[in-house]
Amino acid sequence: MKEVLLQDDAIISPLGFSTQENIEAVKAGRSGLLFHNNRRFSLGGFYAGIIDPELLATEFLKIGNPTKYTKLEQMMLLSIYKVLTSNSKIDLSTTGLIISTTKGNIDLLKGGHSFSEDRFTLNSLAKVIQEFFPFKSQPILISNACISGGLALIMAKRFIQAGKFNSAIVVAGDLISDFVISGFQSFQALSKAPCKPFSKNRDGISLGEAAAAVYVSTEIDSKNNISIIGDSTSNDANHISGPSRNGDGLFLSIQNSLKEASISAKNIDHISSHGTATIFNDEMEAIAFNRSGLKNAAVNSYKGLYGHTLGASALLETIITKHSLLNNELYKSHNFDDLGVSVPLKIIQKTEKREMTYALKTASGFGGSNMALVLKKIENV
Amino acid sequence: MSKDPYFISQYVGIKNTKILKNAKLIFSTQQDSEVLPFLKEVYKKVGLNYPKYHKMDPLCKLGILATSVLLKDSDFSNETALVFSNASSSLNTDLRHQQSIENIVSPAIFVYTLPNIVLGEVSIKFGLQSENAFFIEEDFNPKLIYEYTELLLNSKKAPSVVCGWIELKNAEYDVFLCFISKQGEIPFTTENLKKLYLFENE
């Protein structure tokens, strides 16, 4: 079986417009969650990770006219552009393009904008991205709730191994829109303060927006490489808006991905969890990790830094996990205080150096969806 | 990867007030062709007997209806994967949620503003704890559906797959789902998927 490796990557978020800026912010524990005024909330606003549109437009001006592209398009195009400029070997006539988002340009649905009427559709978004560079092959577009970005990466690996293409650009992005804010608010799922994954007094999610892109191929580089050696998705078959209480789907995803990786749970050094900071999600994940024999792995959640970036989250967090493995650094789980789940977990409380080889990335989402993927560092000797 | 032969064991089409299974008409109505009255009328006639159906949005109702007809009298593993696709995502319910934003927002509507919720509803109804994927395409893309389904089967990530197209736009619906397994007579190929889908659209 062909080894599929994570190559160049880029993250566009409130913490910076490159992977490097983002990793520096993660290391420094600098959160993008700020208070934003919004009349929907009795407290006068909410905590979220929102990208400054003017800073974004200024950055985008280097590659295109920001008035011709929506905020989300600017974010996603910039993330791909940065990957392409960091690797001159990428051939757009043969490289696959896999795009993932939950709601795309849904903020255009209400009208009152200068874009074409159908610009809100996911197919329009895919077309804009394909034509900008342009990619020769038809993009593959995935919308699978909050596992979207991770599933897109899994698909890149599977399609490469099945021989559909030899390399792919995977991109994921989502916005904070009135559409999404009002929905999560109706679920009473939003935290009053910046979210506190796995903590005793956690009270819900903080939303965030981001785009992330990664180049995936089989080329072995001269430096150390990160390979995707196991992956799985599994449905809970339990509830459409809440996780299974015993973590069934996530447990199965973890089992299947470890099996494909041919390693045991003991080998996993680090878990980059979904960790949304809702009561139910974090408890479900803790149970699934314990059932999988993973209670000794070092766990963090990046939601305290970025918020929940929805369809972008699993890709963004996999990219940071890749760098965590390469740098041999475990990054602190931001905003964690006392453990607030019913079973033991080793939450990372301080950023520290640690030799690592294997990491597990997990994500779950509405519709009962779960995914797990195993990353391995291949040392170049 | 080992390559076993796979077959389109069963297939179902729902369009323009008609339900066809394996090219045989099993339900049609002279009533209103709009999606809502159709989904209401068909529930009893097809003998669904699944009260949760009434709480779902129209896209999920179409998914439950199609898979119930498709999998009736079939043996299927609870590892049967779901590979669905459409063009309009969850537009029908997105519009309902959008209209409510300035007034009272309902979580019971908001939860359906994702295309993959239908995968969750189908998984719950049939107890499928399996691989799921929802693709967005401009039109039914038999090549992509074939390639992804085939790799799931060949890599043993699923022993069988329900795959196809489930589109709902402006009250017009177009559903084409296939059950792919080692049993059957119609070879599982891109061309056969295309042919059966076009037959439904004649």
Image: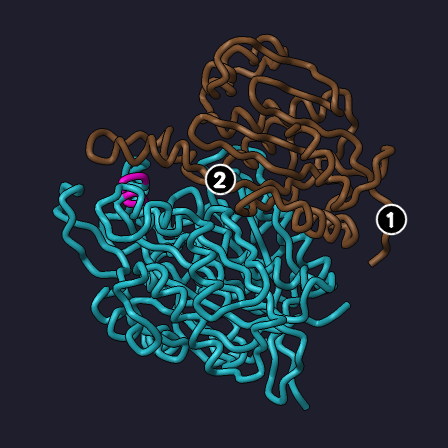
Chain colours: A cyan, B brown
Residue A298 percent location from the top left of the image = 51, 66
- Report the Cα–Cα distance between label 1 and label 2: 31 Å
Q: In the rendered image of this protein, does residue B77 appear above or below residue A304? A: above
Residue A161 found in image quarter: bottom right
Where residue A232 sits in the image (x, y, percent)? 64, 53
Amino acid bearing label 2? Pro
Q: Which chain carries label 1?
A: B
Disc 1 residue type? Asp
**Viewport quadrant of the N terminus of chain B:** bottom right
Q: Contact, CB < 8 Å: mark 1 with mark 2? A: no
* Mark sitting on residue B115: 2
Secondary structure of the magenta portion, mostly? helix
Observer-nearest of A37 and B168:
B168
Describe residue A127's horizontal placement relative to residue B126 as left or right. left
Q: What residue did someone put label 1 on?
A: B4
Query: Residue A139: x, y in percent?
Result: 55, 58
Q: Position of residue B190 (x, y in %)?
A: 74, 46
The image quadrant of residue A338 is bottom left
Crowd rating for badge 1 (residues with CA inside 10 Å; few <14, some 14–19, many 20+): few
- Residue shown at 56% from the left, 30% from the top: B174
Q: Quadrant of the C terminus of chain B?
A: top right
Q: What element carries label 2?
A: loop
Part of the protein shown in magenta: A179-183
User: Label 2 neighbourhood size at 10 Å, few (<14), some (14-19), many (20+)?
Assistant: many
Decide if residue A190 is on the left or right side of residue A302: left
Instruction: Name the residue located 46 percent from the left edge and 81 percent from the top edge.
Output: A85
Q: Residue at (14%, 52%) from the top-left corner? A: A37
Residue A365 in view of the camera? yes
Choose the circle earlier in sequence order: 1 or 2. Answer: 1
